[in-house]
Image (cartoon, coloured by chain):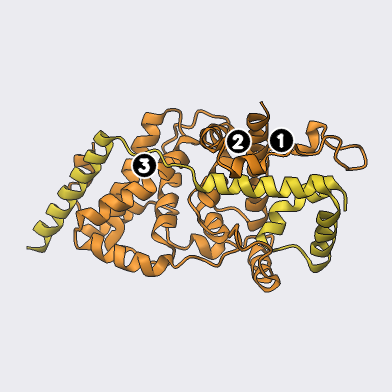
């Protein structure tokens, strides 16, 4: 396995869907290649950072509109039930 | 606009149908396998085991449905706190999904808001065949598309962004310039705050398909099967888009760290 092939397979590796053969070749390459070891570590760091992304909060006018809509929906639902 | 949309001038059944719209059924995830046999790949993946439990990529589907049951019950009961909580959790992702399909942030906001109205109209008929978030995301996507306000050209799965084209590999596939060493610095928290902002920026620069997949998978934490259902793409396509998105963001981070 070359470095280029290794890099193309990183997500498949992390998903756990490589064939037994590919998995072995991947692990062997990983054990011998510092560049690819670093690449894999950085890939994982990237995924971690994505997971920590602060979600921008909804603007308060938008939020109020939705809560108003919800209150109205609830009101009509209750009216329907009567 | 919202008030008009919410008012009940029609029989409930009819309104529900309109609220959900065509294609906004709950069966999205059932088609996740797609023509490439992705479902099979996922199954074999579980058999092989997880190469890295810490990353959590191959975790089994979350316990969403159980959580959903309670949430749906609370919404039906008119629990405003439950609704507000759900809005806080899902709205940003919904806007991002819409934003890749419409021209302005304002329109994306509107699409997301309309989807919430769709949720309220449809909640009584929701049967939980997909998770509540998956269902909402599909509503958003269908509405953003049918709104007909797409300005961006439809970008097919891009073929030009592979890292192999950046000259880092020799003709026979070995590193010419191996990745610079930065993971330790990042993990030490020395540069992390800047990097989070950089990640945010870079997602917005990705082609649409990559934005959708990486946001749903890595930012929002959906499983691959859920993402396939929401976006109606095959498991293989999903993986390619995810891989390219992650690769590009990694490259952007590297640039940031090394500057």
Please, is residue A38 above or below residue B191 in the view?
below
Whether pointer 2 and pointer 1 mark residues with C-beta atoms closer than 8 Å, the reply is yes
Instruction: Label 1, secondary structure: give it.
Output: loop
Q: Which chain is orange?
A: B
Q: Which mark is residue B112?
A: 3
Q: Position of residue B112 (x, y in %)?
A: 36, 42
Q: Which mark is residue B161?
A: 1
Whether pointer 2 and pointer 3 mark residues with C-beta atoms closer than 8 Å, the reply is no
Earlier in the chain: of badge 3 and badge 1, it is 3
Same-chain check, marks 2 and 3: yes
Q: Residue at x 74, y 46 (%)?
A: A38
Q: Which mark is residue B207?
A: 2
Q: Residue at x 45, y 45 (%)?
A: B141
Q: Which chain is yellow?
A: A
Q: Label 2 vs label 1: CA separation? A: 10 Å
Same-chain check, marks 3 and 1: yes
Q: Position of residue A67 (x, y in %)?
A: 21, 45
Disc 3: CA contacts within 10 A as few (<14), some (14-19) or many (>=20): many
In the image, taking residue B170 as reference, residue B191 lies left or right, namely left
């Amino acid at each position: 396995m070359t470095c280029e092939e290794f890099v193309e397979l990183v997500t498949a590796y992390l998903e756990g869907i490589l064939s037994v053969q590919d998995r072995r070749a991947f692990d062997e390459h990983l054990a011998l290649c510092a560049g690819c070891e670093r690449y894999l570590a950085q890939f994982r760091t990237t995924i971690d950072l994505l997971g920590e992304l602060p979600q921008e909060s909804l603007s308060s006018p938008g939020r109020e509109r939705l809560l108003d809509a919800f209150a109205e929906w609830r009101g009509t639902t209750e009216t329907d039930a009567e | 606009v919202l008030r008009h949309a919410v008012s009940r001038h029609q029989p409930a059944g009819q309104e529900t149908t309109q609220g959900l719209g065509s294609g906004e059924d709950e069966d999205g995830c059932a088609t996740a396998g797609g023509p490439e046999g992705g479902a099979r790949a996922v199954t074999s993946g579980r058999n092989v085991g997880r190469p890295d439990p810490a990353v959590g990529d191959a975790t089994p589907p979350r316990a969403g449905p159980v959580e959903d049951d309670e949430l749906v019950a609370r919404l039906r009961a008119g629990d405003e706190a439950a609704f507000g909580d759900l809005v806080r959790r899902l709205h940003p992702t919904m806007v991002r999904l819409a934003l890749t399909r419409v021209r302005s942030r304002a329109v994306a906001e509107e699409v997301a808001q309309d989807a919430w109205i769709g949720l309220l109209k449809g909640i009584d008929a929701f049967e939980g065949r997909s998770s509540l978030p998956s269902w909402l995301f599909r509503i958003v996507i269908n509405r953003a598309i049918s709104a007909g306000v797409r300005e961006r050209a439809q970008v097919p799965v891009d073929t030009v962004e592979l890292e192999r084209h950046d000259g880092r590999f020799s003709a026979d596939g070995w590193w010419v310039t191996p990745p610079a060493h930065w993971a330790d610095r990042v993990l030490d928290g020395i540069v992390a705050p800047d990097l989070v902002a950089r990640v945010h920026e870079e997602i917005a620069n990705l082609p649409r398909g990559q934005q959708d997949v990486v946001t749903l998978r890595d930012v929002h934490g959906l499983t691959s099967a859920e993402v396939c259902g929401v976006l109606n793409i095959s498991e293989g396509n999903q993986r390619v888009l995810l891989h390219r998105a992650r690769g590009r963001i990694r490259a952007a981070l590297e640039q940031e760290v090394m500057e």
